[in-house]
Image: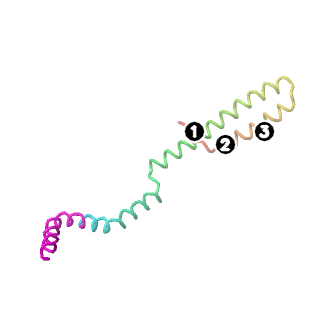
Amino acid sequence: MRRPVFKAAVLLIAIGPLLGGCLAKTALDVVTAPVRVASKAVDLATTSQSEADEKRGREIRKREEQIGKLERRQAKEMKLCNEGDEDACEAARKTDAEIADLLPSLPVEE
């Protein structure tokens, strides 16, 4: 009857050092978890300067593309207007107003 108790004791002594590392790692994970969670939350809540610059660049390129499309449309409308199409003249004026609305949102290039 003493044999099973003795075997269990020997097994626990042999595994003890291995479990100690696991327990220490688990304890470290538990202690550092709130810091990692808070750090991740701050990272998600804030925008770095490079991220802000990239976003601004995308917005500017989108506006430039939109202005380019409007300018091409206006050129077609002006061609028709010069050929005597009054509706095209009105459309060209409206397109010009759309371009004028978008231009102030673009940075001035020096």
Q: Is residue 9 shown above or below 59?
A: below
Q: Tag 3: residue type?
A: Lys
Q: Tag 1: residue type?
A: Arg
Task: Work out whether residue 75 or residue 48 is closer to the camera in this orientation and state it.
Answer: 48
Range of residues picked out in magenta: 1-23
Q: Where is residue 70 in the image (x, y as percent from the top left)?
A: 70, 35
Q: Quadrant of residue 98?
A: top right
Q: How far apart are marks 2 and 3 (CA)?
A: 13 Å
Q: Is mark 3 on a helix, strand or loop?
A: helix
Give the class, few, some or many, for how many residues have Cα within 10 Å of label 2's Cα (few <14, many ≥20): few
Q: Tag 2: residue type?
A: Leu
Left or right: residue 19 versus residue 2 is right
**Residue 61 — which label?**
1
Which residue is at 61% across, 37% downward? 64
Which residue is at 83% across, 32% downward? 89
Q: Position of residue 1 (x, y in %)?
A: 14, 77
Which residue is at 78% across, 28% downward? 78
Name the residue that disc number 3 marks.
94
Left or right: residue 96 versus residue 42 is right
Earlier-in-chain disc, 2 versus 3: 3
**Residue 102 — which label?**
2
Task: Work out whether residue 23 or residue 3 is closer to the camera in this orientation and state it.
Answer: 3
Q: Is residue 82 shown above or below 61?
A: above
Q: What element carries label 2?
A: helix
